[in-house]
């Protein structure tokens, strides 16, 4: 990612709205009404997304507060791997 990518990026509130709309639409197509995020590491959400949203007075969708860390879950079920 370059500085130009960051400068030309959509505002965070717009990206969050697009994400929420896209996922909600996909979930509805599957006949569901809820979902849970599965992340490779929660650190970027907790250390970057949450503070940035707070600085900009944005309300994050619920999925960014309750999610599963795929590495942690893998270690739980396959600790010998």
Image (cartoon, rainbow, N blue to C red):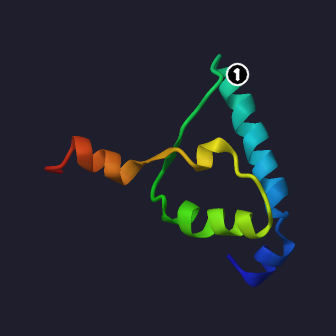
User: Which element type, helix, strand or loop, lies under badge 1?
Assistant: helix
* Place of residue 49 in the rendered image (x, y in percent of width and height, measured from the top left): 64, 64
Identity of the residue drawn at 82% across and 68% down = 9
4 up-or-down from 36: above or below:
below
> Which of 1 and 66 lies nearest the eye of the viewer?
66
Residue 55 vs residue 80, the one in the foreground: 55
Q: Which percent across, then down, holds residue 27? A: 66, 27
Q: Which of 80/59 is in front?
A: 59
Circle 1 Cα neighbour tier, 10 Å, few/some/many (<14 / 14–19 / ≥20): few
Query: Residue at coordinates 69% horizontally, 30% vertically from top-left?
Result: 26
Q: As drawn, which residue projects farthest toward the top?
A: 31
Which residue is drawn at the image coordinates 55% and 63% (left, top)?
46
**Which quarter shows the N terminus?**
bottom right
- Check disc 1 and report the residue beneath it: 29
Residue with the most extreme bottom position: 3
Compared to residue 18, the image places residue 42 above or below, namely below
The image quarter containing residue 21 is top right
**Residue name at image x 13 percent, y 50 percent:** 80
Please determine whether, in this image, residue 5 is positioned above or below residue 57. Answer: below
The picture places residue 43, in percent across and down from the top left corner, at 49, 65
Q: Position of residue 76 (x, y in %)?
A: 25, 45
> Which quarter of the figure has residue 13?
bottom right
Would residue 50 appear left or right of 70 to someone viewing this image? Answer: right
Picture quadrant where residue 68 is located:
top left
Q: Is residue 73 left or right of residue 66?
A: left
Q: Residue furthest left?
A: 80
Q: Is residue 15 left or right of residue 67?
A: right
> In the rendered picture of this protein, how many numbered marks are placed on residues?
1
């Amino acid at each position: 990612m370059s500085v130009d990518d960051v400068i030309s990026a959509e505002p965070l509130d717009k990206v969050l709205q697009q994400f929420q709309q896209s996922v909600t639409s996909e979930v509805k197509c599957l006949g569901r009404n809820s979902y849970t995020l599965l992340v490779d590491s929660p650190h970027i959400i907790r250390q970057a997304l949450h503070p940035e949203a707070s600085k900009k007075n944005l309300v994050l969708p619920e999925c960014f507060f309750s999610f599963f860390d795929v590495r942690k879950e893998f270690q739980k079920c396959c600790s010998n791997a």
